[in-house]
């Protein structure tokens, strides 16, 4: 059976996290993943604390297993959510899009296991010093806000840089990606895009169809000019954003304004024209809608088989 220190640390059966996808990863998806033995994560995204509180309460009615809340640190409500997770003694907190150091002491005092997402070895070391229990090393193959390095290059370097467990993210869509991550030193994987098409995921059906139909080269990272590149499916919105990004006549403020509300339009309204459909580069591998439990079983079984048979490569 495939296991790792992450399973003991968190009290989960399989070292598989579900990515904290803003506007998408709600209590229903998180509870389904946790009930299947992984770590389900509610994404706070840009939502106010009242909305996230309702999701935390709902998750507790749907599962008695550990689950997490992902705090997107660029959100205007990040401070409120940081307090909310303490009040509700959420078992695990992951963070993205920034440095969570100022919240870490309060979270740890509340007994929360803190696992920041990091895009570089420098930030990974900073997080270890600040008291993180583990880090998620996320490569630029992932959907959403991406760092510069690929998972293949980032992961082993982060594993060398810290002594705490490292979870791999970005470009992992099946058991091959999971097995490869373990070979590179990971103690777990975080998967977003594949869970987006889970039966328990409440995202708009148009979003799921777009992921199911996507090919390998169908994502694009836009927004480098604004300092926070974001990977999404190639759509009228992302192509127009790309054009504006390289047009000197368009100011940064106009560009920022153009992107506002686009995640909601994709996830809630399924607006194929104006929505921003965040997706990772493995979208081309995702072609079936399955339950969270089926996804986890398939990935873990394949990874186990590959890792068990690895000695065939050595004579
Ligand atoms: O955060 C993510 N992925 C995301 S966040 C998001 S919502 C969003 N909306 C509009 C603009 C930008 C984002 C959609 N997808 N992944 C984890 C991640 N964290 N990627 C990169 C980072 C990161 C970057 C800088 C983590 C720490 C960091 O520290 C810099 C600092 O502040 O010192």
Image (cartoon, helix red, strand yellow):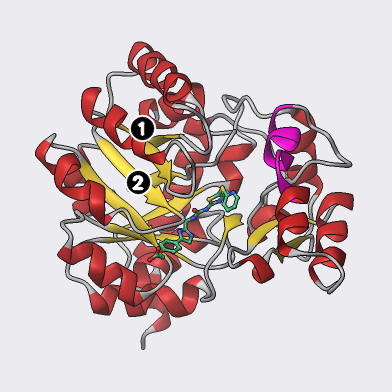
On whether residue 99 falls in the magenta region, the answer is no
Identify the secondary structure beneath mark 1.
helix
Please give the residue where the numbered disc 2 appears in the rendered image: 94
Q: In this view, does 251 lie to the left or right of 17?
A: right
Coordinates of residue 263 in the picture (x, y in percent): 68, 40
The relative height of residue 301 versus residue 80 in the rendered view (above or below) is below
Please give the residue where the numbered disc 1 appears in the rendered image: 80
Secondary structure mainly formed by the magenta segment? helix
Using the numbered discs, state the Cα–Cα distance from disc 1 to disc 2 in whole angstroms. Answer: 15 Å
Coordinates of residue 131 in the picture (x, y in percent): 15, 56
Between 288 and 302, which is closer to the camera in this rendering?
A: 288
Outermost residue, bottom side: 315
Asked if ligand 1 lies within 8 A of label 1, the reply is no
The relative height of residue 272 versus residue 259 in the rendered view (above or below) is above
Q: Give the range drawn in magenta.
A: 259-268
Q: Is residue 170 left or right of residue 279?
A: left
């Amino acid at each position: 059976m495939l296991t790792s220190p992450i399973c003991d640390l968190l009290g989960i059966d399989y070292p598989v996290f579900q990515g904290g996808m803003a506007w998408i990863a709600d209590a229903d998806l998180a509870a389904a993943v946790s009930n299947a033995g992984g770590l389900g994560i509610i994404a706070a995204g840009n939502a106010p604390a009242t909305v996230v509180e309702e999701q935390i309460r709902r998750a507790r009615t749907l599962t008695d297993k550990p689950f997490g809340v992902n705090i997107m640190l660029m959100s205007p409500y990040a401070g409120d959510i940081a307090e909310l997770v303490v009040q509700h003694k959420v078992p695990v907190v992951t963070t993205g899009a920034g440095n969570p150091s100022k919240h870490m002491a309060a979270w740890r005092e509340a007994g929360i296991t803190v696992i920041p997402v990091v895009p570089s070895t420098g930030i990974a070391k900073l997080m270890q010093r600040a008291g993180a229990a583990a880090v998620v090393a996320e490569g630029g193959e992932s959907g959403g806000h991406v760092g510069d390095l690929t998972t293949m290059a980032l992961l082993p370097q982060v594993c060398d840089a810290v002594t705490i467990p490292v979870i791999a993210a970005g470009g992992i869509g099946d058991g091959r990606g999971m097995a490869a991550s373990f070979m590179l030193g990971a103690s777990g994987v975080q998967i977003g895009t594949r869970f987006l098409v889970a039966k328990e995921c409440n995202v708009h059906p148009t979003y799921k169809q777009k992921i199911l139909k996507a090919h390998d080269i169908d994502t694009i990272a836009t927004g480098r000019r604004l300092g926070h590149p974001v990977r999404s499916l190639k759509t009228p919105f992302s192509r127009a954003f790309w054009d504006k990004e390289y047009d000197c006549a368009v100011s940064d403020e106009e560009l920022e304004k153009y992107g506002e509300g686009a995640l909601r339009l994709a996830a809630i309204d399924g607006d194929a024209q104006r929505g921003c459909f965040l997706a990772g580069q493995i979208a081309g591998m995702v072609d079936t809608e399955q339950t969270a439990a089926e996804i986890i079983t398939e990935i873990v079984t394949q990874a186990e088989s590959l890792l068990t048979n690895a000695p065939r490569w050595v004579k």
